[in-house]
Amino acid sequence: MVCLESPRSERQSHCLLLLIVAAAAAVQRSVAFVPSPLIRTAPLSARPSRSSVSLSSMEPRLRHRSQIAQQAHRDHRTGGPDGGNAADEDKKGNKGDFFPFRKDEIESESRNLQFVETTTLRKQLKIFKALAWPYFQKESRARQQFGLVILLTLLNSGVSVLFSYIGRDFWNALSEKNEELFNTMLLRFFGALVAGIPITVFYTFVRRRLGLEWRQWMTTEVMKEYYAHRSYYLIESNKEIDNPDQRIAEDINSFTNVSLDFFITCMTSVIDFLAFSAILYSIDPNLFLAAFLYSSVGTYFTVTIGRQLVGLNFEQLQKEADLRYSLVRVRENAESVAFYGGEEIEGMENERRLNRAVSNYRDIIGVQRNLEFFTVGYRYIIQILPAFVVAPRYFAGAIELGVISQSYGAFNHILSDLSIFVNQFERISAFSAGVDRLGQFVDFLEMQRRRSVAIRNDTLTTATQTEEVVSNGLPASGVLRRADTISTAAGSSHDLMMGSTGEIPPSTGEESTISLPPSTAGVWLAKTTEGLFKMPIDEEKENGFPSQIRTLALPGATLVMRDVMVKTPDESRTLTRDLSLTLSEGEHMLIVGNSGTGKSSLLRAIAGLWTNGKGWIERPPPGEMFFLPQRPYCTLGTLRDQLLYPRTPKDKTTDKQGGDSSPTSVSTADSPTNHNHNHNHNGRRKDAHHHHSASAGSRLPSIDEEEEYISDESLLAILEKVRLGDMVRRVAEADQLPNGLDAVRDWSDMLSLGEQQRLAFARLLANRPRLAVLDEATSALDLGTEEAMYKTMAEELPRLTYVSVGHRPSLLKFHEQKLRLFPDGTYDFERIMRDAEARREYQTL
């Protein structure tokens, strides 16, 4: 403290000293634990480890909330305690303030609370780095733009310092009534304005453009991971991650823009702090010290009061997304809701989700209210604090009025720089919640990528052990390849990720049956373990992968299964045990059984969607395999897009049955699994009839051998074969198009389920796969149309192998084999008789 002669100055100095001592004591008391403003957490001494935090430990809190809400809801409806008041509130429009919690919502909120409460500051910084760093590491343009932003930030701070000095001299000229100096300052001001405007404008423009391009890049990369390894399917099936669409579309946008804003704000704060500290310290050291301590006190109390906002904002994002999802479902299923007359039920569900979002937001604004009791006073005191500190020197004549004006500006700059958490806390808490949600999402994608790579590593490691592979009856000619062949086929880790299971990519080199050297395989496999977003992965999760079904996707293969056990995704039930079979080219098998025996689940395992279990499955790669579900999916686009899905119109037909997918196709005729299997009810083998004979590399007749692409004439002919010709002509006439293939409709809404199933058969004919899997694909068709579809499939694709699931006796005549599944996981193979009399025995499925 500078000793002042005036008694009043001494009193003010003593008051300031007491304020500083009190602030220092408060800061010292908070040193033991200062919660991070970026996360909702507990003191370090009380924070549980990840392994000690379970969903069950969090459920009591949520269940307690649910019980209170449900009891209040019952009182509200039945006139229980305070029932009359509740009825009066209903009349005032407060209906639905209370709402029940469902079990799935409790579990979802428990997972969210677990993720937030176990995310330490260090881990969250790692998550932030893992999300933010790849863009600037991979893209040179991003680094250039970022450097330009830093340069403009420095220039913008220089403009602020320049205006600070111009403002000081301007007010000194007014105080001294110096007209010449006043005019000079006016000219300098306008000159600085001309130079400063472009800097400020481009500073904002470049920041926004960098944020936009960052968002585009990051969204693209996350979507690649989302669609790789069928992560999108696993997210939907196990419900561990809620609303992935919001996390991709909104949370990434918020992350990129707000991250950039916060970084620039922090960098600007550092630059301003360094620039204005010298100014403020030269005016009065006590003013600099007061700014530092005042901001420390403000930060401590802001974080203490408002730290609940992180968790509440996390939940708010989820509840708002849940509300939007419920509204979108009604729109997408409007006709079904209207047929059922389910408007009241849907409205109640929408209202329930709205009330959950409103209730959580009430908690948010309650915390914000408590926080503002402190922050509003904090901001008001700032207006007099600089004058309170420097006024004694001004009254003593040691400084001029312009210096006081400059001290206000410098003090506000420094205090704003040091009080960034106070001023931005609500925004930081919302941003932190977004980082948590995005980190949780990308963490799941990364775990799925590592899980997929781990399965491939195990598959290829097994493939290097030639004698063991052959002795176990695995297709040596398909599995064992040279290292350079597999490496060439893989190309990159992204190219390798073809599915959710351990699929080995197609060979593009010469076929070989020699074993893969382990050393070479190890080098190649190591390259596949690095993801783009290097998330901090929980070792317990990574080491806790359940046993998996190994899938070999081999060009030219049909279908071979060996000792396959299929479990549900949660591993609570075993659906099929030790299933082994071989289907040759052109063979057809029908899967039957009571509901719940795992018929569709077995198809999911063949497709690679369900992987929990054990055993081996050899099948064609995705390009040579086609799936027809009971309710086909109609993509957004033209009718041509529907027919070619999942290919694009530019894909060649020679990639399918019309040609080889590699220079030398793989023959599995000598596979050790090429012995006949048959089983009785107990799952034991009995006299077999399966055989594996056809060469997988032979060509099947295409629609037009001379065409490089599928022509419109071929597509129209396919539509005629599946009895959709009239529909095409109607659409063409309505849109005044030559043939209707370019018509754009909401095909799921326009076509009936039967028409959609016929469209699925048209896709099958257009894509010409080697293996087809039909899951009750004719359930909405009459018997005549069903027969026409199967006959068309047999005529157009005579060497197609297909597996069907169905209950109709009419399906028997289109298959040679029948696989019956039983509830205990066992199965039975039967040959289907061709003559009419013998087939009567099998008319009851």
Image (spheres, helix red, strand yellow):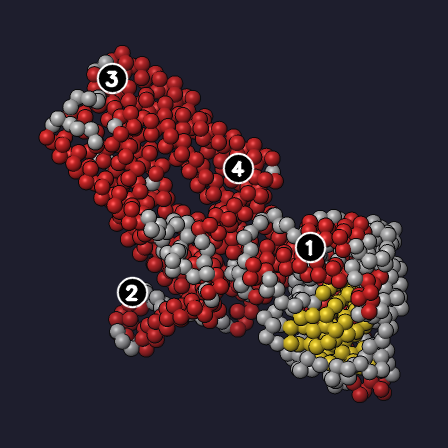
Point out the tag, 2 or 3, that comes first from the N-terminus: 2
Please report contact status of discs 2 and 3: CB closer than 8 Å, yes or no: no
Distance between mark 2 and mark 1 Cα atoms = 57 Å
Instruction: Name the element at disc 2.
Output: loop
Q: Nearer the viewer, mark 2 or mark 3?
A: 3
Distance between mark 4 and mark 3 Cα atoms = 43 Å
As drawn, the label of residue 210 is 4
Q: Nearer the viewer, residue 336 or 152?
A: 152
Q: Amino acid at mark 4?
A: Leu
Instruction: Name the element at disc 4.
Output: helix
Which residue, given by chain and number where applicable, does mark 2 sit on? 92
Q: Residues within 10 Å of mark 1 (few under 14, many from 20)?
A: many
Q: Position of residue 200 (x, y in %)?
A: 43, 29
Which residue, given by chain and number where applicable, does mark 3 sit on? 173
Q: Quadrant of residue 466?
A: bottom right
Q: Nearer the viewer, mark 2 or mark 1?
A: 1
Distance between mark 1 and mark 4 Cα atoms = 30 Å
Q: Nearer the viewer, mark 1 or mark 4?
A: 1
Q: Quadrant of the N terminus?
A: top left
298 in relation to 610, above or below: above
Q: Is residue 345 left or right of residue 421?
A: right
Point out the tag, 4 or 3, that comes first from the N-terminus: 3
Q: Residue furthest left?
A: 7
Point out the tag, 2 or 1, that comes first from the N-terminus: 2
Residue 290 appears anywhere in the view: yes
Residue 712 appears anywhere in the view: no
Which residue, given by chain and number where applicable, does mark 1 sit on? 497
Q: Amino acid at mark 1?
A: Met
